[in-house]
Image (tube, rainbow, N blue to C red):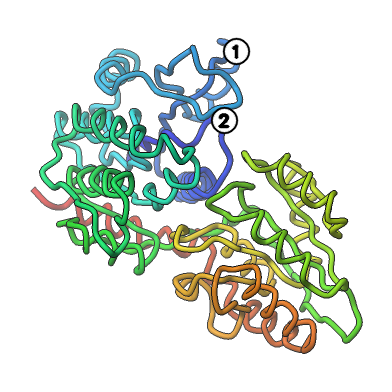
Amino acid sequence: MKIAIFSDCYLDLTGGITSSINAQKQALETLGHKVYIFSTGYPRSSSEIKKLSTQNIFQVPSCKLFFRGVTPVPRRPDIIEKWLLREHPEIKEFDIFYVHYEAGCSIAGLRLGKKLHIPTFQVMHGREDMGATNIIPFGFRTIVATLLNWFHSWFIPHEITIRRDDYLADTIAKAKMWTMMVNHANYADYVICPSHHFAKKLQHYGVKHQIHILPNGYKDSNYPSHPPLKTLHQGESLKMIWHSRLSGEKRILPFLKTLTLVADNYHLDIYGDGPDFKKAQRFARRQHLNVKFHGNTDFAKFQTTLQNSHLDILASYNFDNYPLTLVEAEAHGVPVFICDKDMQEIIPKGSFVMSSGPSPAAMTAALNDLLAHPERIEKMSQIMLKHRDEVLISSRIKELLRIFNSAISKP
């Protein structure tokens, strides 16, 4: 099978979408399928472009005025479509167009699939409404969301308009982002979503397709062979790890505020980067928190720390869909801390600590209760280790291929 992946979140970025695409590409290629990736990216040399092409990874036309430090910005979808047909005429013979995200490169993939009569699959990864709310400064949210919505409607028809409500679209900006997400999904031939809870939200706002549920998986080549059982004894320091983006939507600062109220017997390792990196560093330094910032580092170092941790932290609330943070924790047998009840779908029952709410006070109460009952760590780790084989991408890719083959077999 020949599969073309289109994503605006891949080259020059880290995060769940990138990790998910990498894991699926490796699994598909191991099974003998041909996979191309087309992605927006920063300006790069001809030698870098040639090196990427040996892995069948290709950078689509991107805006050169935007350099490192911001998300790469694609050219208009129609420009990308013409480039694809000119530079990669073989794409006309592909079996599947597999699209991730909702910006220029992704729009081009959907539109070109329609023109070439190739089945298009749209993966709905996350809450763009909450992303816009947390990333864009307060006074600009409605303006930016309106402009993004307007640009999107130039290339993909907006047959559904979401209005403000008392559910998830409680601001004009959020309603605009839901309008974009729903119409983008409806333009594809098929829709895939990693979680049931997000699928229900999409259907609530008007996604007409049946939504296929395909959980994110863990790369087989990174899978630890014999991760140890985690144990914590009374008086021993609780070793925690954070490996999500350091940003507003992931709520790094509320979690650091939580640590100012937690008993002193803890240590937190923070891996990754993001817009709140410096702010989080300054806060931790001022409050004398027992925290170490590692930034973006090599995977082996991060994996060793994860494997030796007692608790994996995910402090996001009403944002995440199927975060790789939880998948990685399960693969290593590490119990997790959550404060969003939707995340219970992703990890085995009994393997997590959940606070009663997203506030620092609620998170503090949950962590202090764990420190008072450290034996819970071993029980949670046992459950994680028992179920960890379920997250392997080699197991989950079978469902993706079943969905693809079903589409190809139709007239």
Label 2, secondary structure: give it. loop
Earlier residue among tags 2 and 1: 2
Q: Residue at x 49, y 70 (%)?
A: 343
Side of 109 relative to 274 (left or right): left
Residue type (three-letter) at the residue carrying disc 2 = Asp
In percent of width and height, residue 135 lies at 50, 41
Q: What residue is rendered at 19% in x and 51% in y?
A: 163
Q: Quadrant of residue 153?
A: top left
| Residue, disc 2 | 12
Lateral position of residue 178 relative to residue 20, left or right: left
Q: Residue furthest right?
A: 235
Q: Is residue 401 above or below residue 157?
A: below
Q: Look at 31% across and 56% down and name the residue there.
A: 170
- Residue 274 image offset from top left, x and y in percent: 63, 41
Residue 47, disc: 1
Q: Tag on residue 218?
A: none
Residue in the foreground of this view, choosing between 291 and 97: 291
How far across and how far down the image is residue 328, in percent?
62, 61
User: Type of residue at label 1?
Assistant: Ser
Question: Where's residue 351, x and y in %?
Answer: 61, 80
Number of the front mark, 2 or 1:
2
**Local crowd at mark 1 within 10 Å, few (<14), some, or many (≥20)?**
few
The N terminus sits in image quarter: top left
* 311 vs 47, nearest the viewer: 311
Choose between 273 and 285: the one closer to the eye. 285
Which quadrant of the structure image shows residue 267? bottom right
Element on which disc 1 rests: helix
Q: Is residue 101 above or below residue 81?
A: below
